[in-house]
Image (cartoon, rainbow, N blue to C red):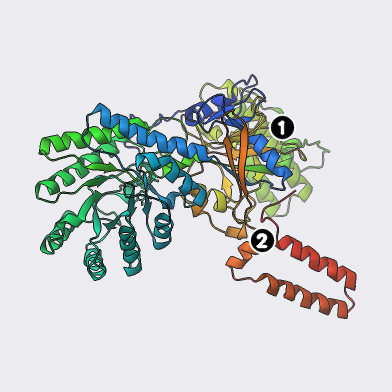
Amino acid sequence: MSSSAAVSRKPKTPKPSRVRVPEKFADAEKLYGIENWGKGFFSVSDDGNLLVHPTRESHRFVDLKGVIDDVALRGISTPVVVRFPQILDATVKELNEAFLRAIKEYEYDGAFRGVFPIKVNQKKVVVREIIQAGRKYGYGLEAGSKPELLAALSQDLGPDCLITTNGYKDEAFIKLALNGLRMGKTVVLILEKVSELERILDVAKRRGVTPLIGMRSKLYARGSGKWAKSGGEAAKFGLTTTEMLDAVEILRHRKMLDSLVMIHFHIGSQITDIRKVKQAIKEAGRVYAKLYRSGVEVKFLNLGGGLGVDYDGSKTAFDSSMNYTVQEYANDIVYTIKSICDEEKVPVPTLVTESGRAITAYHSVLVTNVLDVADRIEQGRTVKLDGDENHVVRELYDVWQGVTAKTMRESYHDALQYKEELFTLFNLGYVSLEDRSKGEILYWNICERIRRHLHTLKDVPEEFEQLEVMLADKYVMNFSVFQSLPDVWAIDQLFPILPIHRLRERPGEVATLADITCDSDGKIEKFIDLRDIKEALPLHLFHKGTPYYIGFCLVGAYQDVLGDLHNLFGEAHEVLASVDEEGRTRIQDVLPGESCERVLSYMNYDRDEMLDGIWRQLRRATERKKVKEPEAKAIAKDFEQVLSQYTYLED
Ligand SMILES: *Cc1c(COP(=O)(O)O)cnc(C)c1O
């Protein structure tokens, strides 16, 4: 994180964000920040369950825990992705209405025609729902590859709705787009490179179709946050000014300037700072206006994606937040483009955006269960000295007895020193395993005692900041970070994470999360916080045998489709839920996740071949009288059963 925009960045606090919850806890909404990031889609019921309000009306809600319990009866166990198609309706509406309002307010003499970039979530239910919700606004789709374009063209989109195409294109891609045009759809081929132009024109000429072409412009302006490098001069995509002028010349020469209908740019995702948005629009607006004045009457100005999501609810330019609203975004775009066009005396363009994250992030929640708590057993033990211990153990014992609020700093330093000495002596052979264990127990008990005294300090010294995190439990969760929350691993993305029940009960534990892959990166140790990043999460005591469910919210953008098969953990089960007019929960659909057999097939394992292999080995074992015939049959049956089961743990 660079520390440029000091005003909008979260203030760095000298004190650590205290993760342990005070004894008199009342408010889960505040503790987990639901009131800040929830955007009206989430709340907590009186009995402590997380409620989802897909229509943002307080009297219509889905009780998430109720959904999980319900589908459990149908044999669908967590991890489960619960989707709320009605949330997609709400976000599509919000974006479109925001632009309509801005257009009215600033008397903008043009229209808004947004498109949804399929790459953000290609799931059929998601794309279908967005199209339906956007139909009355002429909302379209953006495709970046042949399969995405196939998906887009197969949808029932009329000529009012744009289909834009980005990314590199081969002849088949271009043909697909031109066929879309012939079917009466408005498909725009956006150039990433000038060299694509000749090819498009050639293919179009052979087919007797007049193509619709856009140019992706490489802006000088950049985004902010993690994706700042997607924009600017060194960006991977886009045409420089010289290249744009070249493209215009080629078209002019071929008398096909009419085909050039769109100017496009995309400065990166999750733009956290509205000033970056404004800079980019100003530049793009000028590019449009200057081109127009030179006789290139471009109709659409496509401002790409980048509209942010306030994952931590802090309303700042922090990486996981944004310092503006959807309405401000629309207002700034409409107002700025209008001002520029007025000044340059050119007609205003039809505005296009390609918002993906802001449309889809809210619509799904990943729910999974805690399997186990890996706590430090040393913390629950005490040590009795029998007099035969090594002197270092006795020293640690004395330190432990002497910890008070006044001496804790000194105690801590002593403990660190004796711990070092303990290991050194152990390596030299002077300390027994029993003594080493006693020393370790004492060390952790000292840390725990100090932690309890920390609240008495006004300013917590830096060396103690990590203590709470060091002493945190590890809650082992039934899921794979790589499959279900890839951005946590890849780019340290933060998501709101909280229990979906027991929310009126004080969460007295402090934990980090670990997944069930054998990869040490399969963990979550960064959590949202209003002021900073929390390194541990307050959670409830886990009772083995009683399910404890954690929800990962706002995971509807990118996570569904970037996931991988690390350790061959497959896609999670999916449940589509909604509320009806009376506010009753409807489970619209249950889509089972991937089975072992399915994920194995991606690696070219064939079910029958695997079973044959097992049988061959069992036959050999029975011949050698290592296994009896009925036993062999039972083993083969077990094997077959697991093949068709969920890849995650089921009990
Ligand atoms: C990924 C992408 C988008 C979507 O960006 P969001 O930040 O998710 O809105 C839009 N346009 C293009 C060209 C993209 O590559």
Ligand 1 lies under 8 Å from the Cβ of mark 1:
no
Horizontally, residue 116 falls left or right of residue 413, namely: left
Amino acid type, label 2: Cys
- Quick one: 418 or 643, which is closer to the camera? 643
Quadrant assignment, res 179: bottom left
Place of residue 262 in the rendered image (x, y in percent of width and height, measured from the top left): 23, 50
- Inspect this view and state whether residue 169 appears: no
Place of residue 145 in the rendered image (x, y in percent of width and height, measured from the top left): 39, 60
When the figure is inspected, residue 591 is found, relative to residue 538, above or below; the finding is below
Q: Quadrant of the N terminus?
A: top left
- Inspect this view and state whether residue 483 appears: yes
Place of residue 238 in the rendered image (x, y in percent of width and height, measured from the top left): 26, 55
Tell me which label, 2 or 1, sits earlier in the chain.
Answer: 1
Place of residue 334 in the rendered image (x, y in percent of width and height, measured from the top left): 25, 34
- Quick one: 355 or 187, which is closer to the camera? 187
Q: Tell me the crowding category of disc 2: few under 14, some 14 to 19, or many 20 or more residues within 10 angstroms, Cα based.
A: many
Amino acid type, label 1: Asp
Q: Nearer the viewer, mark 2 or mark 1?
A: 2
Residue at 50% across, 51% down: 123
Quadrant assignment, res 391: top right
Does the CB distance between marks 2 and 1 fall below 8 Å?
no
Q: CA distance from mark 2 to mark 1?
A: 54 Å
When the figure is inspected, residue 16 is found, relative to residue 238, above or below; the finding is above
Secondary structure beneath disc 1? helix
Q: From the image, tell me which residue sits under label 1.
A: 398
Secondary structure beneath disc 2? helix
Residue at 58% across, 51% down: 522
Residue at 51% across, 48% down: 125
| Label placed on residue 596 | 2
